[in-house]
Image: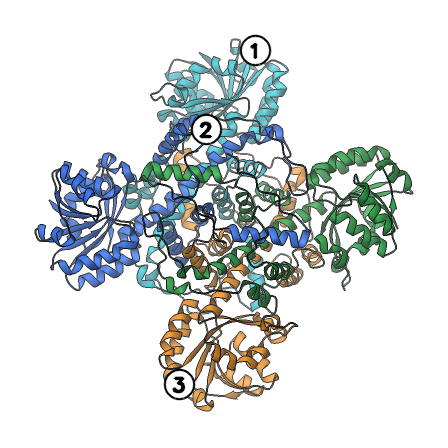
Chain colours: A blue, B cyan, C orange, D green
Amino acid sequence: MQIGMMGLGRMGANMVRRLLRDGHQCVVYDVNPDAVAALVTDGAVGSASVEQLVSTLTGPRHVWIMLPTAITGRVVDQLAPLLAPGDAIIDGGNSDYREAIDRSKALAERQIGYVDVGTSGGVWGLKRGYCLMIGGPADVVARLDSIFATLAPGGEGPDTANHGYLHCGPSGAGHFVKMVHNGIEYGVMAAYAEGINILKAANAGSESRPVDAETAPLAEPQYYQFDLDLPAVAEVWRHGSVIGSWLLDLTAGVLKADPQMAGYGGRVSDSGEGRWTLKAAIDTGVPAPVLAAALFDRFSSRGESAFADRLLSAMRYSFGGHVEKPGTDPKP
Amino acid sequence: MQIGMMGLGRMGANMVRRLLRDGHQCVVYDVNPDAVAALVTDGAVGSASVEQLVSTLTGPRHVWIMLPTAITGRVVDQLAPLLAPGDAIIDGGNSDYREAIDRSKALAERQIGYVDVGTSGGVWGLKRGYCLMIGGPADVVARLDSIFATLAPGGEGPDTANHGYLHCGPSGAGHFVKMVHNGIEYGVMAAYAEGINILKAANAGSESRPVDAETAPLAEPQYYQFDLDLPAVAEVWRHGSVIGSWLLDLTAGVLKADPQMAGYGGRVSDSGEGRWTLKAAIDTGVPAPVLAAALFDRFSSRGESAFADRLLSAMRYSFGGHVEKPGTDPKP
Amino acid sequence: MQIGMMGLGRMGANMVRRLLRDGHQCVVYDVNPDAVAALVTDGAVGSASVEQLVSTLTGPRHVWIMLPTAITGRVVDQLAPLLAPGDAIIDGGNSDYREAIDRSKALAERQIGYVDVGTSGGVWGLKRGYCLMIGGPADVVARLDSIFATLAPGGEGPDTANHGYLHCGPSGAGHFVKMVHNGIEYGVMAAYAEGINILKAANAGSESRPVDAETAPLAEPQYYQFDLDLPAVAEVWRHGSVIGSWLLDLTAGVLKADPQMAGYGGRVSDSGEGRWTLKAAIDTGVPAPVLAAALFDRFSSRGESAFADRLLSAMRYSFGGHVEKPGTDPKP
Amino acid sequence: MQIGMMGLGRMGANMVRRLLRDGHQCVVYDVNPDAVAALVTDGAVGSASVEQLVSTLTGPRHVWIMLPTAITGRVVDQLAPLLAPGDAIIDGGNSDYREAIDRSKALAERQIGYVDVGTSGGVWGLKRGYCLMIGGPADVVARLDSIFATLAPGGEGPDTANHGYLHCGPSGAGHFVKMVHNGIEYGVMAAYAEGINILKAANAGSESRPVDAETAPLAEPQYYQFDLDLPAVAEVWRHGSVIGSWLLDLTAGVLKADPQMAGYGGRVSDSGEGRWTLKAAIDTGVPAPVLAAALFDRFSSRGESAFADRLLSAMRYSFGGHVEKPGTDPKP
């Protein structure tokens, strides 16, 4: 079928390519004309403006937007007045699900459908297909079925979930499920990262330590004498172990390519879903200590605990006269 | 090749079956004669005692033990005097890696090899193969290569890690890596469980809440009105998403079979490795907040925070006159 | 000076008493006429309705409300139309600071002042005085200075902070600071409760444990043979130690009165501020793992991790055939 | 009475001064002769060697040692052969309680008493007195009562606990209770530090933020517009609030002296007790998520999560093409 796509970044462009390959017609727009041109080469219909994109589409129009969450609202506001009753907007980005609930209500008054699609799969989605978590009115979702089926990876079984897409519920349900998906993702990633960091420290007993009242001694250094081959360990875990996963596959790959992680500074971004997941947990009274720890580590990795830590050093000096030890570079 | 196996529980028995299928000769023993008899039917050579098992094996003997960690030490002490220089013991259970370091030293004095093999794969290992993390002297490990190759699931690539087994380092290294593997496992499991618990609470806004000073109000109930189909969500995540994993495959299965988890009481056991992982992190000064949170949740699930919680209620009464709310059954 | 007080629960009633004692005139109202009557006995002017309370006050009127947060908004809506320009409402309850920001704006259009006062001190405030964290327009705050000075405990020093009250900033600042105060309170309480729970377990080595693959063994029982006198330990910590505090004073008291905490079930309430603190931390990207852990433990104490825990047991059965151990009563 | 003191650092020297002031005779030794000379000026009897210290004392001798835990064992080994049956060693440092259990057994064979005294109070102990948590044989503890009474701050009540010292139980019990005391201390400190860090971020809404897919947007900046006076807030909390404590008194002091904490780098040391507390919690199956989070934050403050964080950034790049944002200095 025909679909419009706005936002041709890593995710949007690859989704268009996957749709084109399967015979769908894609009308595309991006603020960056080069991004449009690249997809025209692949068979998309380009447009130079939002207006042109809308006017190129045949009604009922379906415009899928793939944008950073901070921009999505503005673009929806720009797009909606150009649409007619029966048309629909699909937000496939990582927006707060609350916005989908609010926007869908506002647009429903003008008979414009609003579908929120949590889209997982990253840069691998072009090849592997995407996992789609969908919220919105059943009739619009049904109309888009062939689009979802192309984007999803396929699979066997009676339900669309077996094929990689699921109508989770009314507006917001798709982004809610994707939000929690990403919250889980943070936790799973942190579990691997913490564990591998412990493996890296398995030779701590062969290092010398200062002997003073500010340094906890390592009681039994004979038990920390291992120099482990981290890429090999990640690789072996991929085969037959309980913790095999796609993230572990990628982890083994990055460790093999750069065992010291020298190409990274360790300032870990978060793009919102982990935060919203925690806030939903807090609102509903659900304990989520693992997901919280994973999120807070990302904050700390960006220096956001610095003031608290300086205050702790100041307290220690104040009650015990403990002079803070001079900084050394963190262990490689 | 020929191998002895002691401890024919879920893990040991299936490993013997996998070895028999691939042409190895297995001499087996268990305190439960029925477990021995069952494997004799499958082609193993049975023995009625540890002594008989040892005397049936041809030197250099290799005796693999698969026992609960609390028993392993005693059995090694029983077994070692029966062995001759050049023989070897393989501990494939979930023992503390420190014990492997200590035992291997003691046994090396008598020229008995000691190999620690972390074995992941659970009840699925018979079919899928096991992931083997191996520590010990290189010559003994090399001698056992065909055993490891049979137990591991196979795979393509130049290294044994690609096939599912890895010689991680000297004695203790195998159990150390397996220990951290299980620590990670706790974290990954908890990430899924917490996330799915949040999905379950997505309808909190449709429930009534008491209005009093002891209950935090739900500020925006309109955002918590989703009745999500948890088995379907777990299923769709298996296809194309970033959080796809073998544990998620199993999770989708258990949710489909029993969506309310009615068959479980929620007292989550831990068998030691998660504890030792945390202690290693603490000894070596590595932050592991996610793995710790996962472990502590298991403790709490067994009622171990009860006294602390009663004390918190008592403090609240003491400073604020807050009367504890009467217990109600937890949400299903 | 003259002040109106609505909401005569534990906090409101004692505040009135403290004000009366210091010569202020208090006009009081509560939905419970008995609460009004009790304070009339103590010298307050009673009123039978909100309307009567307002009409009894001389302009510029100051009405202080002390209500559960879930009710405050409704009461403000009822009260505001009865007031005149120049009058002011003071919210001394545990309301979300965001509401103070929103309400103060709405009321400012009608020239009604809105002051948010975070009030700490609990049932002891009558005797000890209250700690007051104040937000709102400087002129209204200044007008109320003698009220604040009476409610606060006093102390020496040049600033009102030394006396126990502080104008923290514009509307919302008082409740923001009180919110974080309570977030800290949760963390401090949990630190004591966890530590004392560890002390209680110091005799774990003298208990027998099952020996099976589902139970982590206690490696060195000789190190866990202490029967500690918890009330005495809490008492000694009150004298000269780094962790002395008012909460510890209370903790020593409750442990002495009921060493087994038999009078409590361990379902720990939270009344909102801890939640909002976490949400503020998440919004602003500040790591707060300790405050989060303290909050989530309260959720867990009320059974809210039950579904997640059942799911963990189900996963363990699914991959490892681990049968959940039957529940026993939690340790006393 | 007469007592020997070895280790004249911040703690040891002040304890000697407090003992001298109350009329006790102190024979002192330190590897640093200047430390000895300083106390001789104050009235102590100096010694130039361990041997001299021992020979100066009259039997039954009591030698109190105040040393970094990494040195204590060596000094006990040096000291013990010089002592006679009936003499006693008192370890007042922050040693692992397990060592007290082991050492007391070894020394008991030679009829030398061993008393472990957890000593809290820091540099303020000279003035305020110390809180003493004591383990060891009842007769030796009784013999030292006048020493404990001088070191403790005093107070009213029937029990020694009311005066600041407590015989907690047999050898190890004193250091066990002190260990947990310090574990709690970490938690309490972290609760304040996290909360105050949130207060500092209360103006986040007035800062500009990048708009891109790697940055979580701040949804409602109007709610984060407060510039709070942190020293004043800490001060007001000292008066009448639920979270008043001696640590808060100190915190208010350090914030007043250096509101930006410019004198500290934020690398927070830990000297062992927090680690041992966690290990005891893990061994005994007691949940301690707050204490764990506090400890792990200290590890992170010293750069120990760097490798894990780089790995997280690498994973994000691998699945999503997310390029790590360049580092900027952490917020002041």
Q: Position of residue A304 (x, y in %)?
A: 47, 51
Percent position (x, y) of residue B75? 58, 23
- Front residue (pair D262, C204): D262
Query: On the picture, is C128 further left or further right than B175?
Result: right
User: Which residue is denoted by mark 1 in the rendering?
Assistant: B86
Could you tell me which secondary element the residue under label 1 belongs to? loop
Q: Is residue C312 visible?
A: no
Against C152, residue D310 (above or below) is: above
Tag 1 near tag 2, CB within 8 Å: no
Hey, what amino acid is under mark 2? Leu
Q: Position of residue C40 (x, y in %)?
A: 54, 87
Could you tell me if the residues under marks 3 and 2 are in contact, i.e. CB atoms within 8 Å?
A: no
Distance in Å between CA atoms under marks 3 and 1: 97 Å
User: Chain for mark 3?
Assistant: C
Label 3 packing within 10 angstroms: few (<14), some (14-19), many (20+): some
Q: Quadrant of the N terminus of chain A?
A: top left
Residue behind mark 2: A230
Q: Calculate the distance from the C-alpha at mark 3 to the C-alpha at mark 2.
A: 71 Å
| Mark toward the viewer: 3 or 1 | 3
Helix, strand or loop at mark 2? helix
Q: Residue furthest left?
A: A58
Looking at the rendered structure, the secondary structure element under dot 3 is loop
For disc 1, the chain is B
Residue linked to disc 3:
C85
Label 2: chain letter: A
Residue C133 in the image: state x and y as whole percent.
Answer: 52, 70
| Nearer to us in this view, A105 or D282 | A105
